Amino acid sequence: MTDYSSEDYSKYRLQRAKETIQEVETHIKNGFWNTAINRM
C-alpha cells in the first residue's frame, strides 16, 4: 500500500484542475460548447 500525504493529493488535484482548464479551452475553440460546459 502506498501512503500519500495531503500535500501530494493537493498537488495532484491542482494539476488535474489545470489540465481540465486546458481541455475546456480546446473544446471552446472547436465549438464544443456542451462538452466545455460539462467539463467546467
Image (cartoon, rainbow, N blue to C red):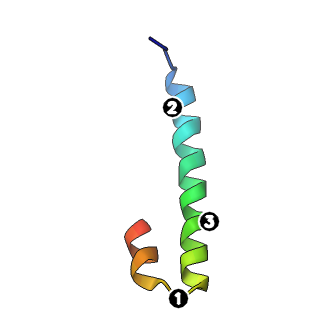
Q: Earlier in the sequence, mark 1 or mark 2?
A: 2
Q: Crowding at label 2, few (<14), some or many (≥20) Cα neighbours within 10 Å?
A: few
Which of labels 1 and 2 is toward the front? 1
Residue 25 in sight from this viewpoint: yes
Rendered view: 6 above or below 28: above
Residues tagged 2 and 3 counted as in contact (Cβ below 8 A): no
Q: Residue at x 59, y 37 (%)?
A: 11
Position of 13 compared to 38: left or right? right
| Residue at image point 57% right, 64% down | 21
Mark 1–mark 2 CB contact (< 8 Å): no
Which residue corresponds to mark 3? 22
* Residue with the mark numbered 1: 31
Of the image marks 2 and 3, the number of the one nearer the N terminus: 2
* Residue denoted by label 2: 9
Q: Residue at x 51, y 20 (%)?
A: 4
Determine whether 2 is above or below 29 in the image.
above
At label 2, the amino acid type is Tyr
Query: Circle 2 — which element?
Result: helix
Q: Is residue 6 shown above or below 14?
A: above
